[in-house]
Amino acid sequence: MAGHNHGHTPAAWTGVTIAFIGFCVAGAFTVAANPLGFWAGMVIIALGGVVGAAMRAAGLGMPKTQHPQPQPTATQSQAQAQTQQ
């Protein structure tokens, strides 16, 4: 696991941090029985996703070339060989 980069990028950290703050706001207002504050927290959560996606589009996310391609298993290789015959 140490050799993998699981989204440790500015875009991921920013999006998750904003969403975490939104969860905290929504949770606090749920306990306080305030529906308006709860929905404000939900908007903040959605904003975290939008900001993260915008930052990724701006080049602050993980490049697509770093994503490893899945290797076929032995069973998949055998099945593919049989279909080609």
Image (tube, rainbow, N blue to C red):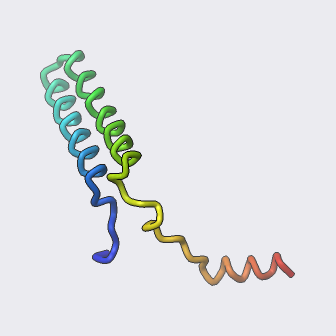
| Residue at (47% x, 66% y) in the render | 65
Residue 81: x and y in percent read 77, 82
Q: In the displayed structure, would residue 13 be above or below residue 81?
A: above
Query: In terms of depth relative to the viewer, which is nearer, 66 or 48?
Result: 66
Q: Quadrant of residue 78?
A: bottom right
Left or right of 12, for residue 65: right
| Residue at (34% x, 72% y) in the render | 4
Q: Quadrant of residue 42?
A: top left
Q: Quadrant of the C terminus?
A: bottom right
Q: In the displayed structure, would residue 18 be above or below residue 70?
A: above
The residue lying furthest to the right in this view is: 85
| Residue at (33% x, 63% y) in the render | 6
| Residue at (53% x, 71% y) in the render | 69
Q: Quadrant of residue 15?
A: top left
Q: In the displayed structure, would residue 66 be above or below residue 16?
A: below
Residue 46: x and y in percent read 33, 33
Residue 18: x and y in percent read 22, 39
Residue 61: x and y in percent read 35, 54
Numbered disc total: 0
The residue lying furthest to the front in this view is: 58
Query: In terms of depth relative to the viewer, which is nearer, 31 or 47?
Result: 47
Q: Quadrant of the N terminus?
A: bottom left
Query: In terms of depth relative to the viewer, which is nearer, 62 or 82?
Result: 62
